[in-house]
Amino acid sequence: MPIVRVALDVPLSGLFDYSVSDDPVEIGQRVIVPFGRRQMVGVAMEITDATDMAPERIKPVTQVLHDSAPLSAQLLELLRFCSDYYRYPIGPTVLAALPTRLRSDKPLVAKPPESYRLSAAGSELDLDSFPKRKVVQRRILARLADGPCNLAQLKSLSATVGPQLKALLQDGYVEHCEAEVTVAEHQLVGAHTLTGEQQDAVDAVAAAQGYACFLLHGITGSGKTEVYVHLMHHVLQRGGQVLLLVPEINLTPQLEHYFRSRFPDASFASLHSGLSEGERLHNWQQAQSGAAQIVLGTRLAVFAELPKLALIIVDEEHDGSFKQQDGLRYSARDVAIFRANQSKVPVVLGSATPSLESYHNAQTGRYHMLKLSGRALASATLPSVRCVNTNHTVMHHGISENLLRDIEQRIARQEQSLVFINRRGYSPVLMCTGCGWLSSCKHCAGKMVLHLNDRRLRCHHCGYQIRVPHACPDCGNPDLHPVGSGTQRVEEVLQERFPDARILRVDRDSTRNKRAWQTMRDQIHANEVDILVGTQMLAKGHDFPALTLVGVLNPDGALYSSDFRAAERLFAQLAQVAGRAGRADKPGEVLIQTEFPDHPLYRALQQHDFDGFAASQLAERQMAGFPPFMYQAMLRAEGRQESEVFAFLGHARAAAVELQQKVEILGVVPAALPRRANHVRAQLLVQADTRKALQQFLRAWQPSLDALPAQKLRWSLDVDPQEF
Ligand code: ADP
Ligand code: ZN
Ligand code: ZN
């Protein structure tokens, strides 16, 4: 009797055995099986004759689902690798990689065919007599007059094709058709003549036979995107698929539109968590069938089926959002590299400030280093970076007089300024001037942030919030004082100083509404804004041509952080915000307000010397025994009882020591935020000289972890952790 071994989304390790009835099962197919009292959707991973279970306990598969093609052996292998490497059960690993619709037992509804042509009425239509103001509809009609098109091709005509196409369908001028629209030649629009360095980069990647990993290291504006575009073109002409991973969901629609405009004939599929379930399924299937030639997405897209995969690009490879922070704690960049290796295709990691892991790998020859050393546009120069010593200047609630004067100049010249502060709210804490009371969160080890517009104190860790008290809860003193500045206060101070200036605050509070951010971007581009105040949301990837000044408030915290990656992240972030200034023909200026203007990190930034900064960081890391010279795993635990949390980690540590392997086992310590939402949090770090030694140890350690009593705790193992 054949047995099918099924991956199920249950928090248990291993696969589950079922018998197969008349309907044969293929590996990779979705099946519905009984589990406990429920029926669940799973994925058939193996088919065997043998099972350890007693024959009478084996239940039959309830139903084999045929509404979607089976998952490929390659994808299953990739998921098995991830499950093993990240020490996460195979079932949830496999199921989490699928769009929600494929995880449900409801039958999939087929989408109507995606191709369009003129109807009889449409063919007879005289375009000259068609209303002139219906610009997009006219464009669609003109295009379809040349022959059928698919949706992707039509989308390249305008950003609002969707509703206009719908109107034409309703009016009966356009109809669906079955025809598979194929494109023989791929047009690349607006290609630049590449610089020597760009051409070398393109040639090197295009010449790769099979797997090779490239680090494309080029400052912002050096033309990395242009290199991607040329490489994509190369792949499209050969009928391959490209996977392009980007860090930020907020950026994907913009990027998608950009790449669509460069490749009007290519078919795209985007994959990110902002899509509806239906869209996500559709796009996933477009990738799976090979119909989507360019798949653009955030980290989860690394698990898309790509039968014709020929190239992977990871843009902003250093970005922290490639790492998933719960469940399967994978790094999409690292999985992309594994996947490229598995599929024998090249992978390009692009960044202005590569992660030190990738940089080190490129220096030691495991990756190929490709450098773009200047800005691509001859007219665009690098911004000049200066430091203002906050101890030696007049400060106005966290903003220096120097910065205010510079902003004033920009307003006079009708240029934009950006004030960057990585803290939202009005001020990070409220203090009593009488007794020194601070607005601590009663559930966390952190402080409650003052939000003045709705007069609330909010904990950014657990979400707990209260009204701002009228007097000190401890001593009754009514004189409560906001300490420090967040975006709201900066906005207020600037508005007082520049009453006529148009100030726009961009942070998670002001962009909560989905459309808000898009509207703000349009305002910025239309030059309806003089001063931008924002958090890191503004640092990433946006191109604001009128922006010529960036002021950075109070970034010093990272210099004395206990997290050894804090300096690396700060450098990347500041280089990125600095890159926002002066992208067009106007030179940009960056002003960093700091107590340590001579700190080597700021020195390196001023000299645009990533290599020097990286060299000093790597030397420190090597001395201290940190990644990339060591490989780490973090065991984290949290629970209501401090004693239980520490007992669990203590036992885990003892079990680790007992294994006597070639790993260094550090002590059990409280987490950076030792209490969150009334849960005590602690951690245990393990590190080894090689990935292999660490993996071997983790495999041996896991069974003892699973066996430890931990009913009242939550714990997780994080391989290659990014946060401490
Ligand atoms: P990055 O991705 O490194 O930030 P981009 O690829 O966006 O840089 O290029 C920055 C600017 O330079 C863009 O406006 C782009 O059109 C232009 N550009 C890129 N390559 C060239 C080139 N070879 N010649 C002229 N302009 C270029
Ligand atoms: Zn008080
Ligand atoms: Zn809290």
Image: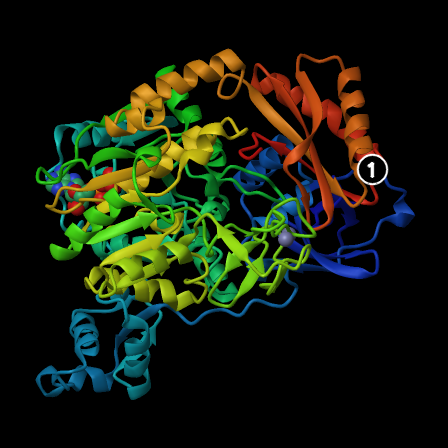
- On the question of residue 427 being in view, the answer is yes
- Which residue is rendered at x = 31% and y = 53% of the image? 255
Q: Position of residue 511 (x, y in %)?
A: 41, 62
Amino acid bearing label 1: Glu
- Which residue is rendered at x = 82% and y = 27% of the image? 651
Q: Nearer the viewer, residue 439 or 384?
A: 439
Q: Position of residue 491 (x, y in %)?
A: 35, 58
Q: Quadrant of the C terminus?
A: top right
In-image side of 684 versus 578 (left or right): right
Q: Determine whether 692 is above or below 390 in the image.
A: above
Q: Quadrant of the N terminus?
A: top right
Q: Nearer the viewer, residue 357 or 9?
A: 357
Q: Determine whether 574 is above or below 67 in the image.
A: above
- Which residue is rendered at x = 36% and y = 30% of the image? 354
- Which residue is rendered at x = 20% and y = 48% of the image? 405
User: Quarter-wise, where is residue 348 in the image?
Assistant: top left
Q: Nearer the viewer, residue 323 or 124?
A: 323
- On the question of residue 366 being in view, the answer is no
Label 1: state its secondary structure.
Answer: helix
User: Quarter-wise, where is residue 687 in the image?
Assistant: top right
Disc 1: which residue: 644
Q: Position of residue 490 (x, y in %)?
A: 37, 54
Q: Determine whether 186 is above or below 135 in the image.
A: above
How many numbered discs, if any? 1
Q: Nearer the viewer, residue 248 or 110?
A: 248
